[in-house]
Amino acid sequence: MSVFFFSRRLRNTTIKRHFYNETKKWEPLTANMKHHIENYWSDKINRKSESTAVPSKNKYYILSMFPYPSGKLHMGHVRVYTISDSLARFYRMQGKEVIHPMGWDAFGLPAENAAISQNLSSEEWTKSNIEYMKKQLIKLGISFDWQRELATCSPEYYRWTQFIFLKLYEKGFLYQKEALVNWDPVDQTVLAEEQVDANGCSWRSGAKVQKIPLKQWFIKTTKLSQSLTEGLQEMTEENWGDIIKLQRHWIGECEGYNFELPLKEVDQSNVTIWTRNPESLKSALFIALKSSHILVKPEYRNPSSTVLNINAVNPLNGRLLPVVIADDLDYPEGSESLLGDPLADKKISELATRLNLQLSADEHDQRTGEEICQKALSEDWGGYKASSKLRDWLVSRQRYWGTPIPIIHCKTCGTQPVPVNQLPVFLPALDGEAKGHSALLSNPEFYNASCPKCGAEAKRETDTMDTFVDSTWYFLRYLDPTNLEAPFDPKRATAAMPVDIYIGGKEHAVLHLYFARFMSHFFHLIGWSPEREPFKRLLVQGMVMGRSYRVKGSGKYLKPEEVDFTGEKPVEKSTKKPLAVTWEKMSKSKFNGVEPECVWDEHGIDTTRLLILADVSPRSSRHWSKDTFPGILNWQDRLWSIMKRWIEHQRQEETAIPSFDRALLEKQENLWYDARNFYLKGATFSIHHSQQISVAISKMQGLTNNLKKVPNNLSLKYSLQYERALGVQIIMLAPLAPHFASEMWTAFVDNAPRLSIDFDWAKTVLEQSWPQVDYDYNLDLVCVVNNQQGCTIKLPRSQLDTLDEAMALRLLQQDHLFIKYNSAQKILSTKFDHYPGMDATLTVITEPKKKQKACP
């Protein structure tokens, strides 16, 4: 390789604006200078587009979980959206047509409660918060596709949420029934099972949940249990991590079947039973219930017997099955009902005998379990695989600020869906928003309606939908946000789905992901989407933690200014009581939060971005401490000083350049060539394959340290490899710190001798292609034999990129160590992990060596 290159390319004499050209000096970097730079570049670092079209090819869909508009960004928001923005900018530089949308999860209890406390309307409070938070995100430099913006509280959005609700109703995935529900006494609304924690407390208010009977709407999510379980098998641990286990645990083992048996004496009511063996329906004699079951009501109880005054109808054969209270039977996990088949269990048989229930002697039903399930499915009384513990999704909420349920109740015609041409059912403005049973009950103009079937007076449903319904499909509306005919065009879904990487908190790894996956499977079932699974890869980011100070033996938290740090251990200033000092999720109540605006006002936007990205993996918790700041601040200073020295070298007159040692320059060129390729390879892998952005930053800092080392008697004016390395350094920095990198790039372009052909000198740094490792640079084929690292084979990139598993195995088999220790063993399995332009790993398992017999 020849890396020594003296010729100079013609320089573009047009001077582009940067701070250096204003001051005529490359002055030391200050916070004020950073603000000056960021103010200049803020409206130049993002591409502006009005198009909502979906790329026809080469798309990359990066989705970050949309926020609830609480009023201001917190550091958790800063982290998730800085991660997503860095990845979006990286993949644009990789040549991808990136979809990077943003919206607002705007309905829900917090907005309603906050508005009530501040004597505002929910709509007014929410819109004000959205406006402020959007300004903050723009200030943070996040390159969202704002032309795709949506808010779930907008009628243009919830019209289609209602449309989807009706589609679920049409397809048999929605029903209403009375159920013992989880009642939050603080927020005064119903919670789904998934919203109650292991201690029986509300996920939102923390209040102890009460059980009360209410008639509620349910989405039959259990109907797709098997499909959702199969979908998990398509996911890899590399892409989903332990979220696969969490989802599988929530769904449970789909080793049985659900069946719905109508009750003879109760209109539009049934009892759900789960059984491993559908053929038990042929020999069932009764239905057993635990005493805690919703059907065990005083009006159904018989004072002298455990047999209730109601009977279930067996849809398989029409027989009546008495309903019995029996707490001592072995119920399936999570179930309160049991099919009384005497052939299945000794206890059931004994109970049947005590109840004088016997199998009919003339019973000759030869139908198989599969035939029974097919009959149930075709007649819509069950027959689908599910686990015994999974419950359908309760979606009714007795609150105002949510999507109105598009149903009308008629005394004559019963439950009737609102006609599609009457959508949306608008959420009316209210004079006052009271807690408790649906605030919409106080608005007769809303709830008085006409039956769409007979035209008679009727009542509109006054419950609203759980906000999790809104977020089950928002990623599809992003693709078609102005569609007036449908929620989204299936053709656009085909072009853009699945989401390539989904970024959000682990607290949503069960609820939201499960519901969104269900809805995607439903859309696939009805032909709206080609993909069952909506998300190819998850990046579950850790929380941002703040240091908290709590008085030991109490729940009292202190502000930092109330803590005495002068002693060996911190104590409360006023009482000198000892403190428990821990890292906890940032919270106003614990006085350990940090306002993002305070950080960027002090240090700058890009410094804030780098601080939140550095030091720890995105998937790990981030301990926010000023002790970590110097690393990033010093790195920016080093980059600034490197540019200062490089500009000075470029502006040297020919006569002022000291004589140099050609051998020294050749040596340095090789060092800079190697450093550029080595750190570029590492940073690219860390961002693209592992999303370990903190490791990528470490690699970039390694390149900075190499660029810092320049022999005193060597001019950089003639160094091709230094120019290449410095350009690569700035380009790699650009996705993470776009303002700072744009400023440095302008100075670089204005002063470069342009010895390199790697860059598009006429374009900004964010328009550059992501750099490539040189094709003559040696990369590693790492060989792991029987779980121990064997040899590392060096190959030029041009060879490694074309390597396949068979070729890699042949290279290993030619290695002298493999020949010496493993050539006699049979190869049982091989695995080839190939990362073109970076590295490759060949993992080989051989049969064990045979032990030699001892001499007699």
Image (cartoon, rainbow, N blue to C red):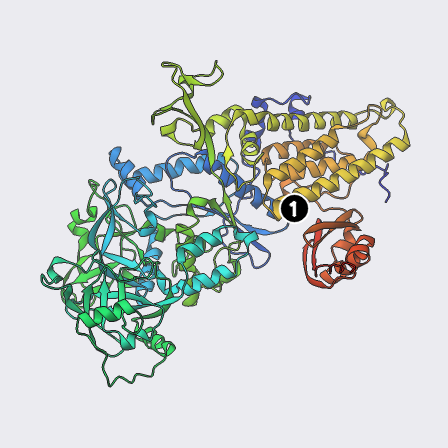
Which residue is labeled 1 in the image? Answer: 685
Quarter assignment of residue 279: bottom left
State left or right for residue 740 relative to residue 422.
Answer: right
The amino acid pointed to by label 1 is Phe
Residue 11 visible to an observer of this rendering: no
Badge 1, how many Cα within 10 Å: few under 14, some, many 20+? many
Q: Position of residue 543 (x, y in %)?
A: 47, 38
Q: Quadrant of the N terminus?
A: top right
Q: Position of residue 392 (x, y in %)?
A: 32, 59
Question: Closer to the camera, 360 or 46?
Answer: 360
Label 1 sits on a secondary structure element that is helix
Q: What residue do we see at 47% from left, 55% from top?
A: 479
Q: Is residue 633 above or below residue 841?
A: above
Q: Is residue 676 above or below residue 596?
A: below
Q: What residue do we see at 70% from left, 57% from top?
A: 844
Q: Residue furthest left?
A: 303
Residue 541 visible to an observer of this rendering: yes
Q: Is residue 179 above or below residue 198?
A: below
Q: Position of residue 712 (x, y in %)?
A: 82, 23
Q: Residue furthest front?
A: 856
State left or right for residue 513 relative to residue 173.
Answer: right
State left or right for residue 27 relative to residue 457.
Answer: right
Q: Quadrant of the C terminus?
A: bottom right
Q: Position of residue 719 (x, y in %)?
A: 81, 34
